[in-house]
Amino acid sequence: MKIIRLPAKLAAYALRLKRNQQSIGLVPTMGALHDGHLSLICSARKENDFVCVSIFINPKQFSAREDFKKYPRPLSKDLELCRKAGVDIVFLPEAEDIYPEGFGSFVDLPAISSLLCGKTRPGHFRGVATIVLKLFNITRADNAYFGQKDAQQAVVISRMISDLNLPVKLRVMPIVRCNDGLALSSRNVYLNKQQRQDAVVLYQALCLARCLIDHGLVDTQRLLLRMRQLIAKHQTAKIDYITAVDLNSLKPIKRISQGCLIALAVKFGKTRLIDNIVI
Ligand code: AMP
């Protein structure tokens, strides 16, 4: 497994692979790898000649009051997991090589970036879209692997690929969960014992939604109220949003319909968790 730190070096390497007709699968991550990341790597491994995993905690997608500084960085464990998963290249850049002095170009998708998580995380998806476009350009990826866990991120990337005619195929993979249903996340390590127990209510609320819809409930307000009531039973939970939206536009819908997205963000102490289901 190669570890490449410089964007120019990876770009040159990727160009050589492309000249030799090798397909490249890219898995962008911020490290602290878990089984969710590994499922993306596993799909990339099956579908490409070369697999590149990027590990980069992108400062441009964190606001000043967010957890950039304390975000977990278990690098040697991550490298070991990548090695075991058959990754060919780990791209491990420094922020100053990604954003050198004078850097000034950004990708902005204001219509979808301002909704859901964008309301409490202004600038977040601008940072995400910008780094992902840079990674696409550096790695010349044929296929790029993202998790449904970050549903809005997948919609932003899909829109960017389509709007900018990027020659990349987006692959969105299912959410990997713990046995009790909590979606795996690098941020779960921040939770204390009580918060970790209470956090299961996110998945329970989504399951409740699915069950109510299966029994014929279509009124969005009534559905979301039932979910809110369930989550509110847990004192450590503070709801940021719960919403039902169209999966492409992310605009709220009045009536539940096939293919809609039910998404939520809930804070436990300082830790903000997200989860979702597609109906
Ligand atoms: P992150 O390192 O948190 O930026 O995540 C990197 C990629 O892994 C993103 O595309 C996430 O959506 C995906 N991911 C994170 N958690 C999960 C999970 N529990 N199941 C599936 N994919 C995930």
Image (spheres, helix red, strand yellow):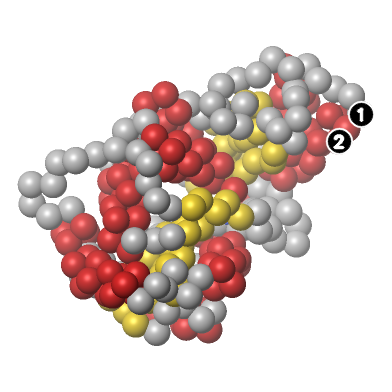
- Circle 2 residue: 211
Q: Is residue 12 above or below residue 131?
A: below
Q: Residue at x 46, y 65 (%)?
A: 25
Residue with the most extreme right position: 215
**Residue type at tag 2:** Cys
Any atom of ligand 1 within 8 Å of the CB at mark 2?
no
The N terminus sits in image quarter: bottom left
User: Residue 237's spot in the image, x, y percent?
Assistant: 62, 38
Residue 168 is left or right of residue 172, and the answer is left
Where on the picture, by quarter, is residue 216?
Answer: top right
Q: Is residue 118 above or below residue 83?
A: above
Q: Is residue 78 visible?
A: no
- Circle 1 residue: 215
67 and 8: which is toward the camera:
8
Residue with the most extreme left position: 102
User: Residue 215's spot in the image, x, y percent?
Assistant: 91, 29
